[in-house]
Amino acid sequence: MRTTGWRRAALILGVCLAAETASPAAVYAAAVPDSGREAQADTPAAGPALGEGLPQAQEEPAYSKEELEDSVLAYGEISGRIENYNTTYRNLNTQLYRSTTNIAAARDLAEEADERMEDAFDIKSSEMDAETRALYEGYRDAAQELRKQAQKMTNSELSGSGERTLRHTKNQLVKTVQNLYLQYEAQAAQEAALQKSEELAQARLEEAQARQALGGAAARDVLMAQRTLTQARSGALQLEAGLSNLRQNLLILLGFPYNAPVEFEPVTPPEESRIAAMNPQADRQAAVWANYDLQTIKQTAADGSAARGNKQRNVAMTEQTVAIQLENLYAGVMAKRQAFEGVKAQYEAAQKSWQAAQAQNALGMLGRADYLQAEYAWLSSQAAYTAAVCDYERAAGDYEWAVKGLILADAG
């Protein structure tokens, strides 16, 4: 019976190897000869369509498909663009979708293995020659091994872990793009002011050259004006290059072509109702429960009393850290709100000054350089206001992300 023994050993070995290295269809083919005719092991799994697959990480986007794909991008559309068009997120979603599909197939294989084990037991008890009986016992043993391997693939934590990974990835991507968007808006607001400063520097240089021609200005004054103009041009060119790179990165992350003619809508200050809803004491439990670092610690195995004690201490310390960071982030929101209110008051005063300068210019009471100076002051105030809005929104977003489990290591 040496041949029969080899057949049994080879059969079980094939099941083990297939279960470790191939898809569930390949495992089934290894355990059941000729089954590959019905289920091809190397057929690529189809990825999910947009919005399908695993449960999505957050609430459904409030924007329609048409709004997400038009040429105007709103700050609130970032989450929807990441979920539906970001390459990294879509690839991960597809991989996890395939994993959950394999899990379902493994469960089916486990049920099939149970049935085949019962059949093998019935056949063993009937009138059969020794070699045939041994072969069916091999099928029974293979079915048992298949059930073990299928059980490994049906670990209930896999789908939950996949969902957490997907949610974490999406949140990180959305937060990253939001920060880039805010950075772009703040810098774009500076561009107009820098361009006006170049125009102002050119006017000042022309004035200095005119005075020099009349003997009213020294060569040093002209040289200083030229230096100011050079610096203004350099600053404007550097900002232009930086904005171009930042814009391309934003478009690519959001799933647009890098040169797409997309218009970015201005960011608005956080609504007061949104800020009023923030409460570190009330939000603490949600932040602790959702924190990714804490989830990782809790899922780490701890064998022995010492290891369990260390794990409990790490959990307690991390919970305390999350609570402290949440308080710090809330304090940051309050500070940015106060700073925004101050800049807003300055912005409103600058607006009145600019209106007065326009009226004076209309009456011929301002020279060209003085008018450009007033316009530059107004554009600078606009840039400062936009920067304050972006800082305020970033602080509010950091707090809200912390409640959802995403806290930066240097938060606060």
Image (tube, helix red, strand yellow):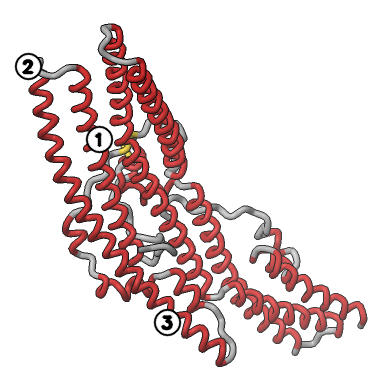
Residue under label 2, please give it.
363
Q: x, y (%) of residue 35?
A: 70, 64
Query: What residue type is disc 2 on?
Result: Leu
Q: x, y (%) of residue 198?
A: 33, 24
Disc number lying in front (3 or 1): 1
Q: Secondary structure at mark 2?
A: loop
Q: x, y (%) of residue 251?
A: 43, 39
Query: What residue type is disc 1 on?
Result: Ser
Look at the picture and state if 204 lies above or below 303: above
Q: Residue at x 61, y 75 (%)?
A: 152
Question: Crowding at label 1, few (<14), some or many (≥20) Cα neighbours within 10 Å?
Answer: many
Q: Which of marks 1 and 3 precedes in the sequence?
A: 3
Residue under label 1, please give it.
380
Residue toward you, 87 or 399: 399
Q: Please identify the quadrant where the N terminus is shown.
A: bottom right
Disc 3 + disc 1, Cβ < 8 Å: no
Residue toward you, 372 or 65: 372
Q: Quadrant of residue 362?
A: top left
Q: Is residue 183 left or right of residue 335?
A: right
Whether residue 288 can be seen here: yes
